[in-house]
Amino acid sequence: MGHKPVPAENHSQATLSSYGVGFVRTLDPHVRIVSAVVFAVVVVSLNNLWVLLAALGCALGLMIMARMEPKKTLCRMASMDGFIIFMLLTLPFTVPGEPILTVFDYPASKQGVVQATQIGLKANAVVLAMMALAGSMDSVTFGHALHRLRMPENLVHLLLFTVRYIEVLRVEFDRLRTAMKARGFRPTNSRHTYVSYGYLVGMMLVRAMERSERILQAMKCRGFAGKISLPSDYHFHRQDFIFSIGLAVSVALLAVWEIISVGTY
């Protein structure tokens, strides 16, 4: 029996399965995207640690409203933190300032610790809010919303194709790796292993090009002329207005708190 590839839509559904049918899922996609961008812009401009903790609390509130599974959410947040953990750990030793401790004769400054904490809080608050507001949308809905927000049409098309075929290429990669293992390939620290992986990457590129040609011909046969119709049936409702007002008030309070803290400092 041959190996049957899993459609990319299944991966999208599996990703969305970590979100319950919460209040956020009922909002208009345009409201969710604009809210995520506004929240991110305001949060990255904050510096007071208490205000940043409050912003992280707001992001946690959005997570609750989106009914995101805590375990899967924490795993995704941990994978994001893994990219910046090295920077956060080295900042206290590279930023000049008042030393508070010494590790192997390297002084760690108070200013460096504060800056690392600020970056960590900002990153986690923004990513968590993005996951709650925009991450719970499928790629087609996200693309339609961007199109209605007057994003460049070519950029929207590129986004839709990229999201769709990343999973297709992943499935193709898994098939090639399975075929290599079936032929007795075992990765080791040897020239043969590196050459085999080189062949694997080359085969992936060849198959990707062949697939793109087949898809282009199929789209032309269906009347594709360089433009994809992106209809949208979403409308602004009462819950969208209530959510927009609530988020605007929360963001305004964070900004006012930050201004007051700067003035008193």
Image: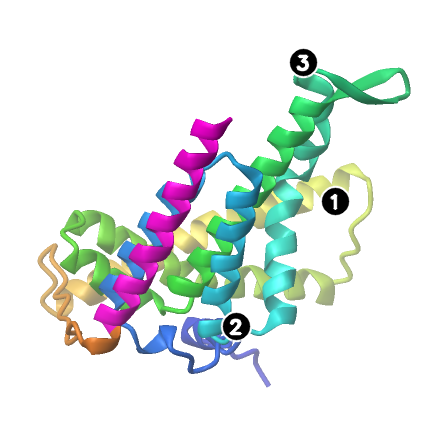
Query: Looking at this rendering, what residue extends furthest in the front direction?
Result: 264
Image quarter of residue 136: bottom left
**Residue depicted at 36% across the width and 68% down the height:** 137
Looking at the image, which is closer to me, 150 or 254? 254
14 with respect to 200 (left or right): left
Could you tell which of marks 2 and 3 lies nearer the N-terminus? 2
Magenta stretch: includes residue 188: no
- Give the secondary structure at mark 3: loop
Q: Between residues 187 and 20, which one lies in front from this camera angle?
A: 20
**In this figure, which colouring scheme has been used for the structure?**
rainbow
> Which of pointers 1 and 2 lies earlier in the amino acid sequence?
2
Q: CA distance from mark 1 to mark 2?
A: 41 Å
Which amino acid type corresponds to the residue marked 1 in the rendered image?
Thr
- Earlier in the chain: of badge 3 and badge 1, it is 3
**Magenta stretch, residue numbers:** 240-265
In the displayed structure, would residue 8 be above or below residue 227?
A: below
Question: Which is more foreground, mark 2 or mark 3?
Answer: 3
Give the numbered dot on residue 193: 1
- Residue 129 position, x and y percent, is 45, 57
Amino acid type assigned to the residue bearing label 2 in the image: Met
Question: Label 3, on which residue?
Answer: 96
- In the rendered image, the vertical position of residue 265 relative to residue 179, given as above or below: above
Apparent side of residue 38 relative to residue 57 in the rendered image (left or right)? left
Q: Provide the secondary structure element on which disc 1 rests.
A: helix
Question: Would you say the residues marked 3 and 1 are in contact, meaning their CB atoms lie under 8 Å apart?
Answer: no
Position in image of residue 184 (x %, y %): 78, 61
Q: In whole angstroms, how far apart are the C-alphas of marks 3 and 1?
A: 45 Å
